[in-house]
Image (cartoon, rainbow, N blue to C red):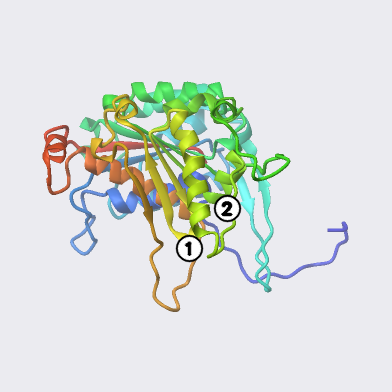
Amino acid sequence: GDGGEAIETFQGEKSIGGGSVSMACKTLARLTHGEPYDGDYMQVAPPAVHSVIPLCKIGNDDTGNKLVSLLENCGSACRNVSTKAMKVERDRDQEARTALAVLPIYQDGRRGCFFDAASNSTFTPEQLVQMMSEAAAAGPESGMSESAPSLPIGAFLFGYPHLLPMMQGEALAHIFDKARTFMEDGGVIALDLNGVPDTDYPSKTTTRSVADLRNDPVLGPALPHVDILHMNEDELVNLTGCQIEGTDASQLEDEFNIASAVSLFLMCGVAVVAVTRGKRGCFISCNDMERFEKSKALPSSWVDCTTKLDALELPPGTRINTNGAGDSFTSGLLISALIRHTGMTVPTDRSVQSSAQGSTRSAEDFRAQS
């Protein structure tokens, strides 16, 4: 404001876990539990992922303590979220501070945002790799399922690299390369985008080339390591310069432009690219067999597949909150890949039957970024 001393009133506050880690953990904890806390709690059967390990930088402060509590509560009913690695890193760095966003919501529907990146701005690849290594070697926390220590690590889901200045470009590629070494058969690496800045292209109709994407300072070197890449259509426009009008009259042209832009990421080495479009659903495109053979944990039945899914129509009066929608979508798509890899579907042909003969053990899931 203008620096005056006027008192502004407000009607209460609510603290929730924000950011990639918190939003994804909520979905993963609900989709992957294998041992219900009691007989009344719904069980997803069979579980493809047994435990979720959030990895993010927090401080020994009230905000960090609250975030740990919120994450643990995500899995309280099914004992499948372990915050041990976060706590160890917090105790190791006494100077760390937890990132915090304050969002005032005004009576007319507008909202603001005050954001303190805190230790997100200094979180290093070395620190994250050390957390991954310790999490891979350690057993579960007290209160978690006793079977967790024997389970392999199946996936690494990384969120919001544009908001982590120390984990971009070659540093991000290094993180993914190290993550492979901690996972069975190299696991599945998923990348969820947020905070992609607007472009300075002279025209939105100027589409970037494959060479442009490979030289992108944030994503370029890491793209060949990514098995599942998610972004929304605005982020696709910002990254590629493609044109999306978003009208009924432009629907066919928009879908063509989206497919063309997505193909750039496939040519850069990404295995699966998913673009969410809000009420218009999503578009998913998969690479060829040569790329899938580099990631053994991906389901071979997805090779060369492309699909367009409409958004589900919710019942009238449903309260819609889109916060974390992209994180939930990415988490669900990742779980779908793990389930199909383990053969947890009804075999319909030889390729699915072959998949069913592969590993059927449960997997653990890493999660990075606050």
Which numbered disc flags the more N-terminal residue, 1 or 2?
A: 2
Does dot 2 land on a helix, a strand or a loop? Answer: loop
Residue picked out by circle 1: 279
The image shows a total of numbered marks equal to: 2
Q: How far apart, in angstroms, are the residues tagged by discs 1 and 2?
A: 14 Å
User: Residue 256, how many percent across, how many down?
Assistant: 48, 49
In the displayed structure, would residue 106 be above or below residue 20? below
Task: Using the image, tell me which numbered label, if any, was put on residue 5.
Answer: none
User: Residue 83, how many percent across, how many down?
Assistant: 40, 40
Residue picked out by circle 2: 244
Front label number (1 vs 2) = 2
Q: Nearer the viewer, residue 72 or 341?
A: 341
Does dot 1 land on a helix, a strand or a loop? Answer: helix
Q: Residues within 10 Å of mark 2 (few under 14, many from 20)?
A: many
Residue with the most extreme bottom position: 316
Residue at the image point whose x is 55% and y is 59% from the top: 250
Residue at the image point whose x is 54% and y is 30% from the top: 219
Q: Nearer the viewer, residue 174 or 254?
A: 254
Residue 225 visible at all: yes
Does residue 282 appear to the left or right of 1 in the view shown?
left
Residue at the image point whose x is 53% and y is 35% from the top: 57
Indicate the quadrant where residue 123 lies.
Answer: top right
